[in-house]
Every structure is written in structure tokens, then in C-alpha cells.
Image (cartoon, rainbow, N blue to C red):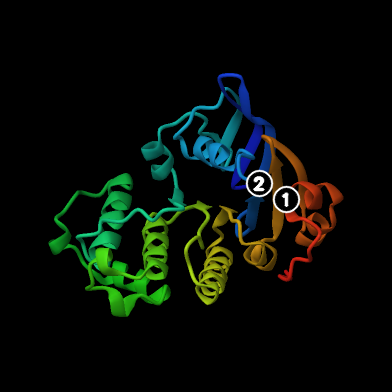
């Protein structure tokens, strides 16, 4: 069974049809990229999957359960994690405390009780940070971290929810090239080991073609291409509206 199934998704703003009849699925452990020019409808599509926007038509299913139109907190509690283009952390709290807060939310979903962060067992949060190469930053406030480190903290927060589906909105935006490669390679490894379905948007085509198992291409709200990286890279329409004539250096 696919982790995420999207069928006939539609969204308009006044007379502008931002998303038009979009359908796709994401399998457990799969890295699926959603790309396209600015204004193609990527963010609108993401926001409908996450519950921030209600679709005008269509359906979103998580492991067969209809989650169309649910609020973001309900979607989170069903096992959907999300990272954002602009990182969202508590700047005055330490790295460890940020991850502990996410774990508190997760355990509340599973029927546990809220407890002060200071009284929590820090081991689960430290284990997550160790996995993401952030254990040495655990005691530092997020407000003073380098941007690449903030991206890793945000990923740890999303993974604290033990997600079945991870939505990543431009996960490498603002990062140095080597940081981009490292973060996406680690994400792909975790996704495959844990069976997490990953849907991500990204403007760095080297990242996309190096790490995506499949690629969806949106233009003016419509899917114009989908398939393996080599197939999408060679598609004349994709080259015309987005990639251009230059070669993409990344290889899957």
C-alpha cells in the first residue's frame, strides 16, 4: 500500500487555478521530488497535504485513511512530519529542548502525559541528535546556530514524530553545497531504513537528480511529467518550461 495517495487535487484563488487535477502516490521509503518553476503550485499542493489549505476538490489519503481537509495538528498526529523553507525552531531554547518538545507532542498523541521538559528523559532526543550529527550542539540555543545546523534540528523535530510521511519544503535552501549533499543523503538513508515516505520540493537540480527515486514536474498547476530522474531529465517539455537546455550534472 502506498503511504500517500493524492487524487484529483484542485485549488483556486479567485480566478487563478493554482492546482489542477494533480494525482500521485508515494511509497514507503521512497524519495519523491516535486519540482517546477516559481508559481507552478508546489507550495499550494504541499499546504493542502499538510492541512493548511482545504482542497476545492480531490482526496488525500494516508495509508488508506482519508485526511483531506484535516487541520495541521490532526495531520501531525496521524504521522505526517514537515520541514519548512524557512526553519521553524524555538530560538531561545536549546537544540535538545527543541527536540524534547517535539517528543512531548508525539507522546501526547500516543496517549502519554505532558511533562516539563526538564523532567523528561533526554536519551531519546539525544539519540536523534546523534543520528543527525548534532549531539555536540545539544546544549546550544537554536538562535545562535549556523543555518545548516538549524536545518538538521528541524529534521530532528520532524523525525521525533516517528512520521510515516515526511514533507520537506526546499530542505537545502540557504545551505552550502556540501551541507546540501550531506543532509539529503542522510534523509534518504533514514527514509529507506525506516520506511518513511518522503515528498520534497527543491530548486537545486543536482540535489533533485542525485537523491530522488522519482520526480513530479508541475507547471501552472498541472503535472506535465513524472517518472525516474533520467526520464524527466530527457523530457522536452520539462526542459522547455524549467530545466533549460543545459545539462543537469547530478546522477541518480
Residue 205, placed above or below residue 79 = below
With 95 as the anchor, is 191 left or right in this view? right
Camera-side residue of 5 and 47: 47
Q: Residues within 10 Å of mark 1 (few under 14, many from 20)?
A: some
Which quadrant of the structure image shows residue 161? bottom left
Q: Which residue is mark 2?
A: 37
Q: Sequence order check: which comes first, mark 1 or mark 2?
A: 2
Q: Is residue 1 among the parts visible in the rendering? A: no
Camera-side residue of 22 and 160: 22
Q: Residues within 10 Å of mark 2 (few under 14, many from 20)?
A: some
Residue at the farthest front position: 245
Where's residue 229, x and y in %? 76, 60
- Label 2 near label 1: C-beta < 8 Å? yes
With 72 as the anchor, is 36 left or right in this view? right
Q: Tag count in the figure?
A: 2
Which residue is painted at 51% across and 70% down in the image? 183
Where's residue 110, x and y in %? 33, 48
The local secondary structure at tag 2 comes to: loop
Which residue is painted at 70% across and 48% down in the image? 216
Q: Which residue is mark 1?
A: 242
Amino acid at each position: 500500500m502506498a503511504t500517500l495517495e493524492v487524487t484529483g487535487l484542485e485549488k483556486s484563488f479567485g480566478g487563478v487555478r493554482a492546482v489542477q487535477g494533480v494525482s500521485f502516490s508515494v511509497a514507503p521509503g521512497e524519495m519523491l521530488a516535486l519540482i517546477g518553476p516559481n508559481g507552478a503550485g508546489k507550495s499550494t499542493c504541499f499546504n493542502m497535504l499538510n492541512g493548511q489549505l482545504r482542497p476545492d476538490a480531490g482526496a488525500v489519503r494516508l495509508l488508506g485513511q482519508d485526511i483531506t481537509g484535516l487541520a495541521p495538528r490532526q495531520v501531525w498526529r496521524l504521522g505526517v512530519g514537515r520541514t519548512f523553507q524557512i526553519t521553524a525552531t524555538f530560538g531561545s531554547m536549546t537544540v535538545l529542548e527543541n527536540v524534547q518538545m517535539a517528543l512531548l507532542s508525539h507522546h501526547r498523541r500516543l496517549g502519554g502525559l505532558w511533562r516539563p521538559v526538564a523532567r523528561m528523559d533526554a536519551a531519546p532526543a539525544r539519540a536523534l541528535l546523534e543520528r543527525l550529527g548534532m549531539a555536540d550542539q545539544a546544549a546550544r540555543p537554536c538562535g545562535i546556530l549556523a543555518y545548516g545546523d538549524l536545518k538538521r534540528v528541524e529534521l530532528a523535530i520532524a523525525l521525533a514524530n516517528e512520521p510515516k510521511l515526511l514533507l520537506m519544503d526546499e530542505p537545502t535552501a540557504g545551505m552550502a553545497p556540501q551541507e546540501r549533499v550531506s543532509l539529503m543523503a542522510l534523509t534518504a538513508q533514514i527514509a529507506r531504513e525506516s520506511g518513511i515516505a518522503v515528498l520534497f520540493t527543491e530548486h537545486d537540480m543536482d540535489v533533485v537528480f542525485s537523491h530522488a527515486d522519482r520526480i513530479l514536474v508541475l507547471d501552472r498547476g498541472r503535472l506535465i511529467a513524472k517518472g525516474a530522474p533520467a526520464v524527466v531529465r530527457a523530457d522536452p517539455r520539462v526542459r522547455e518550461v524549467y530545466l533549460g537546455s543545459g545539462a543537469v550534472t547530478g546522477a541518480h
